[in-house]
Amino acid sequence: MARYFITGGKPLRGEIRVSGSKNATLPILAACLLHGAPNVISGVPALKDVDTMCAVLSYLGARIYRHGDVVRVDSTGVQNLEVGEELMRRMRASNLVLGPLVGRFRCARISYPGGCNIGSRPMNLHLKGLRAMGARIEERFGYITVEAPRLVGAEIHLDVPSVGATENIMMAAVLARGVTVIRNAAKEPEVVDLQNFLNRMGARIKGAGTDVIRIEGVEHLSSVEHTVIPDRIEAGTHLVAAAITGGDVRVTNVIPEHLEPVLAKLREMGLEVEVGDDWVRVAARSRPRAVDIKTLPYPGFPTDMQPQMMALAALAEGTSIITETIFENRFKQAGELRRMGANIKVEGQTAIVKGVEKLTGASVVATDLRAGAALVLAALAAENGTVVDGVEHIDRGYERLEQKYAQLGARILRVPA
Ligand code: UD1
């Protein structure tokens, strides 16, 4: 357990390098279960969620070697096909082992991930996909058991473009007999990275990045080396850090097109945005203007950036309307921001944010990963000191955030709680 002491009011300036994408790394690590040979993944961020996925793979019998940002996963010895409650509760994305386990071993059992802080997050679409491919599924005593003596290609239409369901179905389909087509698939860049990784292994997948993905089953896969894409949400968070502190920050190791929905909103708020090949710079010359935001599946505005933008809107000139359409409980940061002087009213899935001229330091609690990031951003901009508790949530998705921001001039200290 740790907390941050942050003394705000200092504009952040300088350059910051983004780590590899958490949400690309997790399914790619899970996909290593698909065959019994080693794969080497580079650009892997040092995050708690990555530790958890490595713990899950080890528990199943894989051998993991980590050195810096390189991870070697050897799934030759995998024999255990069950993930229990403790590991599933630590991280929802542990459910990404289901598709590859069923694909390779034809059966798997995981504890039901249940709800989480930001919403109920069911798995019905993951299971609908596996069922369409011939799997028998039993949900009893808090566990999901999937058995598929024969996994065959199928046409699967997702009711909503779920990222996790798209990835799990893709991974299960790689070794299935025949062709699987996923319609209304998630188009997130992390799905494209997973496709690229799987194809390098020998899979035959087309269409990731569009809403129709076609997977032709293959018999064999082989070892590969792969570098994960940069984390677009980490990058977006740093751009907001520049904007909210009235600073000027160049964020490197980014794929600017992945950030387009965020950059469009920052421009609309009056921030100066400069884009290079693999970097983006944001400078704040004046107080940002209010903006309306609606979260949507990619390429819409990402729900994972909504709390951070709420912190920025809290200090903008005018009233912003923020609508959350992906998760039902993702305004937890609003109450904490109010403790810092923000004027935010939440009505159902909409937040009305009336910008104030200044925020003041307070004692606040991070309830989940991105809400925690939003509080850090608000604290960097606030007058005087803020204590942010619950830093373990922030560690799930940001690598050494305090060190990165200290390098940009922030006064931020991590202390044990
Ligand atoms: C992934 C990301 C997470 C991000 C989210 C939405 C990872 C590891 N996590 O989560 O950071 O916030 O995408 O961009 O990549 N749904 C169903 N049934 C299902 C599955 C999902 O109804 O079977 C609904 C969810 O409740 C939610 C929506 O679909 O309303 C999107 O969820 P989904 O895309 O599945 O999110 P995750 O893959 O869990």
Image: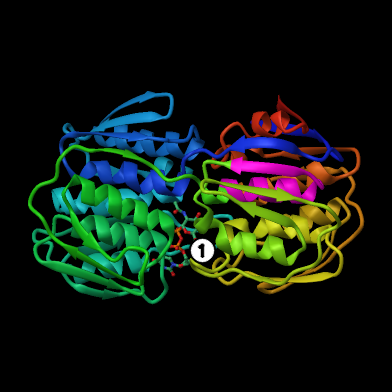
| Amino acid type shown at disc 1 | Ser
Q: Which residues are magenta?
A: 234-251
Q: How many marks?
A: 1
Is residue 368 magenta-colored? no
User: Ligand 1 near label 1 (Cβ, under 8 Å)?
Assistant: yes
Q: Position of residue 242 (x, y in %)?
A: 73, 46
Residue shown at 68% from the left, 74% from the top: 348
Residue shown at 35% from the left, 57% from the top: 192
Q: Main secondary structure of the magenta part?
A: helix
Q: State whether residue 332 appears in this view.
A: no
Q: Position of residue 14 (x, y in %)?
A: 71, 35
Image quadrant where one finds the N terminus: top right
Towards the viewer: 177 or 259: 259
Residue at which label 1 appears: 120
Image quadrant where one finds the C terminus: top right
Q: Position of residue 46 (x, y in %)?
A: 49, 32
Is residue 241 magenta-colored? yes
